[in-house]
Amino acid sequence: MSNSMTGRCFCRAITYEFDGPPKWAIHCHCESCRRATSSPMTTWLCVPRESLRFTRGEPRYYRSSPGVRRGFCGECGAQLTYENEGRAGDIDLYAASLDDPTQVRPVSHVFAAEQLPWLEILDELPRYATTNEGGKAKPMRIGPKRN
């Protein structure tokens, strides 16, 4: 039985796999992710760079901000990866690009201070104003806004 997870772009020109479970999965509400995906938020999973293999095709890349590059399919334009020089040993993948996105469970929301006011996810996960990198941030709240 294989311990790898697989994913792909929309047109299947790029496929990938990685070994083991992701390090984490999170929902991101930052403006950069919203603009990159034309969606109100995105869900990321993080894997060690050495565990990721592109099994068909290779992404094209663009620099979205200093020290950050994003990978996408040159054929269909589907977003696939996020790489930050500050976390050189890791690569983030869009959870929705997995062949089976139900294999991951997000653990938090990040950049919740930038969340669009017309979107509320009804889970009981912690919401961090920016990131919880390093695991020391205090959440701005747990669960959705309650009126």
Image (cartoon, rainbow, N blue to C red):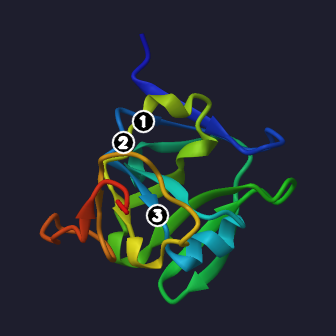
- Which residue is pictured at 55% across the width and 61% down the height? 119
Q: Which mark is residue 22?
A: 2
1 or 2: tag closer to the N-terminus: 2
Assess disc 3: are there few (<14), some (14-19) or many (≥20) residues with their C-alpha within 10 Å of its C-alpha.
many
Q: Are marks 1 and 2 in contact (CB under 8 Å)?
A: yes
Q: Amino acid at mark 1?
A: Val
Q: Secondary structure at mark 2?
A: loop
Q: Determine which residue is flagged by label 3.
A: 28
Q: Nearer the viewer, residue 115 or 144?
A: 144
User: Quick check: can you spot residue 37?
Assistant: yes
Q: CA distance from mark 1 to mark 2?
A: 8 Å
Furthest-right residue in this view: 75
Query: Residue 131's image quarter?
Result: bottom left
Q: Determine which residue is flagged by label 1.
A: 104
Q: Which mark is residue 82?
A: none
- Which residue is pictured at 57% across the width and 59% down the height? 81
Assess disc 1: are there few (<14), some (14-19) or many (≥20) residues with their C-alpha within 10 Å of its C-alpha.
some
Residue 111 position, x and y percent, is 40, 73
Q: Secondary structure at mark 1?
A: loop
1 or 3: tag closer to the N-terminus: 3
2 or 3: tag closer to the N-terminus: 2
- Which residue is pictured at 40% across the width and 71% down the height? 112
Residue 52 position, x and y percent, is 48, 45
Residue 142 position, x and y percent, is 25, 57
Q: Secondary structure at mark 3?
A: strand
Q: CA distance from mark 2 to mark 3?
A: 16 Å
Q: Nearer the viewer, residue 78 or 108?
A: 108
